Amino acid sequence: MTISEKVAYLKGLAEGLDLDTTKSKEGKLISVMIGIMEELAMSVEDLEENALNLGEEIDVLSDDLADVEEVVFDEDEDAEDYDDDWFEVECPTCGADILVDDDALVDGEVECPSCGTRYAMELTDDEEEDEDGDSEEPEA
């Protein structure tokens, strides 16, 4: 039984007693108390409904936040799996990916693991422009 149902039951009991709510002090008191209890019961039910709605909204937000965390933190974990001291270039002969690390840059050459061709390495910026304003391609 809800609070409103309990208050309605008390109101029915009070009405069954045929209390005089206009002349009797006790009748007036009981009538006012039941009125206050009805208002409180309605307020409590509204609060319970709002709490349930807020709980559902919190669950949705929590799910959305979990999705965001998965995207953000998975990217960080993937980045940590790789060493920041290397990059990939494509072999001009066979098209295979060649990993270039600090040692290869120090040596000044790299060997393709697929075809075995050796290439001289020169480190340049992708955005570096020559005197004509054309972009230079990094050499592999």
Image: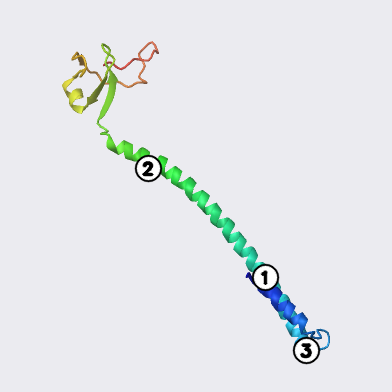
**Residue denoted by label 1:** 4
* Location of residue 51 with respect to 102 vertically, above or below: below
**Residue occupying the far right of the picture:** 22
**Residue denoted by label 3:** 25
* Location of residue 25 with respect to 75 vertically, above or below: below
The residue sitting at 24% across, 31% down in the picture is 85
Between 136 and 14, the one nearer to me in the picture: 14
Between 68 and 14, the one nearer to me in the picture: 14
Query: Label 2 amino acid?
Result: Phe
Q: CA distance from mark 1 to mark 2?
A: 48 Å
Q: Dot 3 lies on which element? A: helix
Q: Dot 1 lies on which element? A: helix
Q: What is the x, y in percent for residue 132?
A: 38, 10
Point out the frontmost of discs 1 and 3: 1
Q: How is the image coloured?
A: rainbow
The residue sitting at 45% across, 43% down in the picture is 67
Query: Label 1 amino acid?
Result: Ser
Between 93 and 119, the one nearer to me in the picture: 93
Q: Which comes before the other along the chain, label 1 or label 2?
A: 1
Q: Within 10 Å of the Cα at label 2, are there few (<14), some (14-19), or many (20+) other Cα atoms?
A: few
Q: What is the x, y in percent for residue 61?
A: 51, 49
Image quadrant in which the C terminus is located: top left
Q: CA distance from mark 1 to mark 3?
A: 25 Å
Q: Which mark is residue 53?
A: none
Query: Label 3 amino acid?
Result: Lys
Q: Dot 2 lies on which element? A: helix
* Location of residue 20 with respect to 89 vertically, above or below: below
Q: Which mark is residue 73?
A: 2
Q: What is the x, y in percent for residue 63?
A: 48, 47
The residue sitting at 49% across, 45% down in the picture is 64
Q: Within 10 Å of the Cα at label 1, are there few (<14), some (14-19), or many (20+) other Cα atoms?
A: some
Residue 117 falls left or right of residue 77: left
